[in-house]
Amino acid sequence: MSEDKKNKDGDSGYEDVCYLCRRPESVAGKMIHIPNNICICNDCMQKTFNSMDKMGPMFGMPPYMDMFGGRMPEHMEISKKQKLKKRGEKKKEKKEPEGIFDIAHLPAPHVIKGALDEYVVGQDFAKKVISVNVYNHYKRVLTDDLEDDGVEIEKSNMLMVGPTGSGKTYLVKTLARMLHVPLAITDATSLTAAGYIGDDVESVISKLLAAAENDVDRAEHGIVFIDEIDKIAKKRNTNSRDVSGEAVQQGMLKLLEGSEVEVPVGATNKNAMVPMATVNTKNILFICGGAFPELEKVIKKRLTKQAGMGFNATLSDEFDREQNILQKVTTEDLREFGMIPEFLGRLPIVFALEAMTEDMLVRVLKEPKNAIIKQYQKLLRVDEVDLIFDDEALRAIAKRAVEKKTGARALRAIIEEFMLDIMYEIPKDDLIGRVTITKDYIEKKGSPVIEMRGSGNAKLLSQQEAAE
């Protein structure tokens, strides 16, 4: 180092060395001086910033922190190219979200119901109600700005009442997939009043915004399904504030009616580090669903209020064996259950789903496009094996499912139980060509019929052989 530079800078004449990589200034370039007489080269400082933030434009840094002005250091050039290559591959696979349909392509109610029929068995009345109200809702949304005659159509939010496993959630999922609109499915059990531990009411809209890929316009035309809505009923015999019951219902009033809500983007809770977006819920369709346990008792109490004696009198036990007593539900029953009148007033369409009968469960097993049996047949088709279910076997499965009283959800648990050994044994033998499930096998009185490939003779697979 020259004498002039030593005198000017006041240094000792020794060359600075990077504290991290130990390279001298003549190799690494000009050093950055930080407190405690520590020197760091530009490359090591850049690596430090990269490890702090991975989401920025240049190695995860905002522009004002990019010391290289967009230029990449040589020792990091290969890894950066690999990252860009991976990002390019992901962008090719990603599909552009489909736009909101216009009034000319809005499917009619019978078309909507026909699409629901392909995936959901039974529930004809519920599918008809949903089809008509969804059609009217999106007619209202798409024609709201076309005419200004002073007539404003109100929202048609819906409340579904039905036993567990009757298809409430599946109906809404199928509907949203058909209409190509964003769908947010949330659980009311986690909602609490503002300021308490749990999710705020606005988190429902945050999930819808995330489903719309943070596109506010698409989110404002989406569908929100709030499941387990019966869990926010008013709590009885409590002296403290009902933060997860009546308070949540009151917090959802403006949300259901239509208002501008500020929600965090990419998060469910508001904080200073998360950007906010304003979403108008005026054109968002809210569908609430719940099993409402013990609501049957409330309905029976109302129906048998005038019970008496005589030939034409209503008996007190007349509705004890009524499976679809939820079909007789009214807003009066829901108020008695614990839903406040203001909340019910913003859900004008109330309807109930049918309980799953044995015949309906048999149809659920084989008729829908993605029926459970078709799923297992597709799995065994990969091994070039045909899977067949006898009609009596399907009936036996449905009978066991009815006894569990969990609706269609019980079907998969039952099938998983007796398909375990079959799925385990079949890959062992390449000669197996067909498996037939019989009623005796479901009832654990026999074995499935195994047919070998290339021969018409059937071979019975005993339970001992299956276990081995």
Image: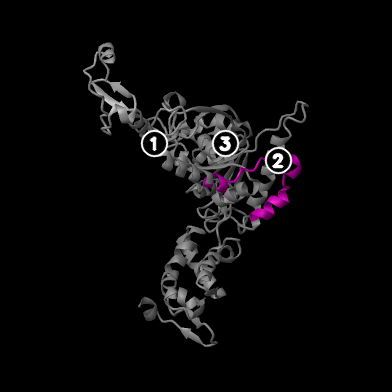
Looking at the picture, does residue 242 appear above or below residue 108?
above
Looking at the image, which is closer to me, 147 or 26?
Answer: 26
- Nearer-N-terminus badge (2/1): 2
**Callout 3 amino acid:** Leu
Q: Dividing the picture into quarters, in which one does residue 322 lie? A: bottom right
Q: Mark 1 points at which residue?
A: 237
Which stretch is magenta? 89-116
**Callout 2 amino acid:** Asn
**Callout 1 amino acid:** Asn
- On screen, residue 168 versus residue 124, left or right, reads left
Is 195 magenta? The answer is: no
Q: Which residue lies furthest to the left in this view?
A: 12
Is 109 magenta? The answer is: yes
- On screen, residue 253 versus residue 419, left or right, reads right
- Nearer-N-terminus badge (1/3): 1
Give how far apart the Cα atoms at labels 2 and 3 are: 20 Å
Disc 1 vs disc 3: Cβ atoms closer than 8 Å?
Answer: no
Looking at the image, which is closer to me, 442 or 465?
Answer: 465
Res. 416 mark: none
Q: Mark 3 points at which residue?
A: 344
Q: In which quarter of the image is the C terminus?
A: bottom left
Describe the element under mark 3 as helix, strand or loop.
Answer: helix
Q: Name the residue under label 2.
A: 136
Residue 309 position, x and y percent, is 56, 54
Closer to the eye: label 2 or 1: 2
Looking at the image, which is closer to me, 60 or 454?
Answer: 60
Looking at the picture, does residue 442 appear above or below residue 120?
below
- Nearer-N-terminus badge (2/3): 2
